[in-house]
Image (spheres, rainbow, N blue to C red):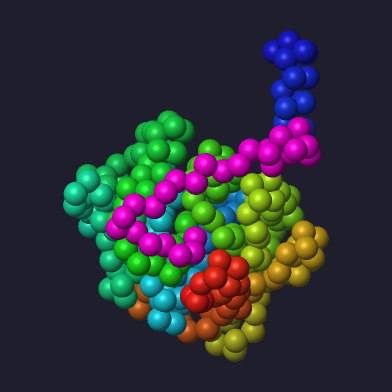
């Protein structure tokens, strides 16, 4: 690449990251269809893969449903969808009625739409290029009959690429929960997620730290395999709320694998994060003149 071309690309990136170019582009939010009334959209994001983003998304969804809310999950991790299996929908297929997709329901009533629900076999690879993936996300939002939902949780793919931009630009996201792990690179990857949300003018609700510890089954002592927690330090560095920790729980991991997660989830996990989602929804409703979620 010629030096002038490199300079031009660098200037464009700098302008998006630090100037007004990125913020000046208003999101083109896709309209809901007549069979959907989704009141609040909450994204669950991470700066890198393998930190348990789908787990956190599932916990929030189940917690909200247990509180009596009407909840859905849009699995935006198109190339690596794990939500259907975790939520007991492995092997099921979505159907269409009057040209609209109908989300599948879990045993607890949570509605789910995922790429794995439209593939012939759940192990089939999704060999789609970026524009096709972006189109699928828009379809899962605007061409899916979600019905009446208080919360639609969006399980985002890792990183800050095309799909994340599509979600932020196409869906009316009220805020995002960022998921991290207690490792040396955590501040850098959390910073990417925070900066992406800020550029897209999407509020960051807070930070959840996963895989923070292992609890001894005999004495209850907590062991920190990845070193001390960085939750408070990282949250303070980026001026966001610390919303809680999750330990490594083999029983919960097994429940995700066999599809019993919804039933097996212990009470009280990520209660503060769930409270924050509800509080933000109530604030948004108040601003909109609504009645609260």
Residue furthest bottom in the image: 219
Which residue is painted at 34% across and 59% down in the image? 36
Q: Where residue 73 sits: x, y (%)?
A: 40, 61
**Image quarter for residue 264?**
bottom left
In which quadrant of the rendered image does the N terminus lie?
top right
Up/down of 268 relative to 29, above or below: below
Observer-nearest residue: 259 or 103?
A: 103
Query: Could one spot residue 112 in this view of the protein?
Result: no
Residue furthest top in the image: 2
Q: Is residue 33 magenta?
A: yes
Observer-nearest residue: 255 or 115?
A: 115
**Image quarter for residue 262?**
bottom left
Number of labels in the image equals 0
Which residue is painted at 65% across and 59% down in the image? 203
Query: Could one spot residue 237 in this view of the protein?
Result: yes
Q: Where residue 182 sits: x, y (%)?
A: 68, 63
Q: Give the magenta-colored segment's residue range.
A: 15-41
Which residue is painted at 35% across and 78% down in the image? 263
Observer-nearest residue: 30 or 233?
A: 30
Left or right: 170, with 127 as reference point:
right
Q: Is residue 282 magenta?
A: no
Left or right: 77, with 97 as reference point:
right
Which residue is painted at 60% across and 49% down in the image? 48
Residue furthest front in the image: 289
Q: Where residue 78 sits: x, y (%)?
A: 41, 45
**Image quarter for residue 265?**
bottom left
């Amino acid at each position: 690449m010629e030096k002038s071309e490199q300079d031009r690309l660098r200037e464009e990136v700098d302008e998006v990251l630090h100037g007004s170019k990125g913020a000046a582009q208003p999101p083109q939010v896709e309209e809901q269809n007549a069979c959907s009334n989704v009141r609040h959209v909450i994204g669950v994001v991470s700066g890198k893969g393998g930190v348990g983003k789908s787990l956190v998304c599932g916990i929030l969804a189940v917690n909200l449903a247990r509180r009596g809310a009407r909840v859905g999950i849009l699995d935006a991790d198109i190339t690596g969808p794990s939500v259907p299996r975790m939520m007991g929908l492995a092997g099921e297929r979505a159907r269409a009625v009057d040209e609209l997709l109908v989300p599948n329901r879990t045993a607890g009533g949570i509605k789910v739409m995922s790429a794995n629900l439209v593939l012939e076999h759940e192990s089939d690879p999704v060999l789609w290029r970026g524009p096709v993936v972006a189109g699928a996300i828009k379809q899962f939002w605007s061409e899916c009959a979600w019905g009446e939902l208080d919360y639609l949780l969006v399980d985002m793919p890792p990183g800050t690429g095309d799909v994340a931009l599509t979600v932020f630009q196409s869906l009316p996201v009220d805020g995002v929960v960022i998921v991290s792990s207690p490792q040396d690179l955590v501040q850098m990857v959390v910073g990417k997620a925070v900066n992406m949300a800020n550029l897209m003018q999407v509020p960051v609700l807070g930070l959840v730290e996963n895989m923070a510890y292992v609890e001894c089954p005999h004495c209850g002592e907590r062991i920190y395999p990845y070193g001390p927690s960085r939750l408070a330090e990282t949250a303070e560095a980026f001026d966001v709320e610390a919303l809680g920790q999750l330990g490594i729980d083999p029983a919960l991991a097994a429940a995700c694998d066999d599809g019993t997660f919804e039933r097996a989830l212990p009470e009280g996990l990520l209660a503060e994060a769930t409270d924050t989602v509800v509080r933000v929804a109530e604030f948004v409703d108040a601003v909109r003149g609504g009645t609260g979620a």
